[in-house]
Amino acid sequence: MLKLKEDLPHDHGNGEQLKNLQTQLDNEDKFNNVADLFQHLGSTTRLRIFWLLCHCEECVINIAAMMNMSSPAIAHHLKPLRESGLIISRREGKEVYYRAADTPQSNLLHIMIEQVMEITCPD
């Protein structure tokens, strides 16, 4: 942990700024949370499912049909998205519907995907 600017091998005159940064760097749990989130997104399939669910609420069977995959495969991809808080679900009878969570993280990811892909939301 950085205590004084003299603790660094080189003094570039930004010791106070580095102390503040070091405080954040020392909080590995927060960085682990972000890394876990990105790990959940480390799949093209999950990104595609997430993007779809930003635009509609849908059941596993319909998501599977749209993605040309099996329902169990889709369920496998939905679990980490749900655990990360990026999507939420609701049950209606025997059917479970999924959609993107209305959180700053989900909204930011949605915007980022569309900016990187240079697409806009469908009407």
Image: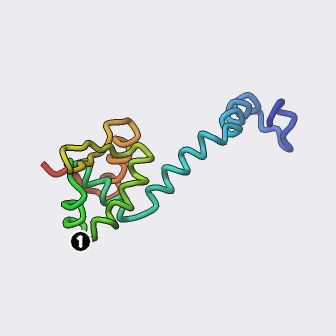
Q: Quadrant of residue 51?
A: bottom left
Residue found at x 55% / y 50%: 35
Residue shown at the point (38%, 47%) measured from the top left = 109
Farthest residue, direction top: 16
Q: Secondary structure at mark 1?
A: loop
Q: Find residue 89 and report its image quarter.
A: top left
Q: Nearer the viewer, residue 98 or 105?
A: 98
Horizontal arrangement in the rendering, residue 77 relative to residue 54 (left or right): right
The vertical placement of 60 against 33, above or below, is below
Q: Position of residue 21 (x, y in %)?
A: 67, 35
Give above or below for 43 relative to 105. Answer: below
For mark 1, does the 10 Å Cα neighbourhood hold few (<14), some (14 to 19), or many (20 or more) residues? few
What residue do we see at 24% from left, 65% from top?
64
Q: How is the image coloured?
A: rainbow
- In the picture of the structure, the residue carrying the numbered disc 1 is 68
Across and down, in percent, residue 81 comes to 39, 51
Q: How many marks?
A: 1
**Image location (x, y in percent) of residue 92:** 19, 43
Q: Is residue 105 above or below residue 117?
A: above
Percent across and percent down for residue 91 are: 24, 44
Q: Is residue 6 left or right of residue 24?
A: right
What amino acid is labelled 1 in the image? Asn
Looking at this view, is 91 or 11 the one in front?
91
Q: Which is more toward the observer, 97 or 23?
A: 97
Observer-nearest of 111 and 81: 81
Residue found at the very far left of the displayed protein: 123
Q: Residue at x 78, y 38 (%)?
A: 12
Question: In which quadrant of the rendered image does the N terminus lie?
Answer: top right
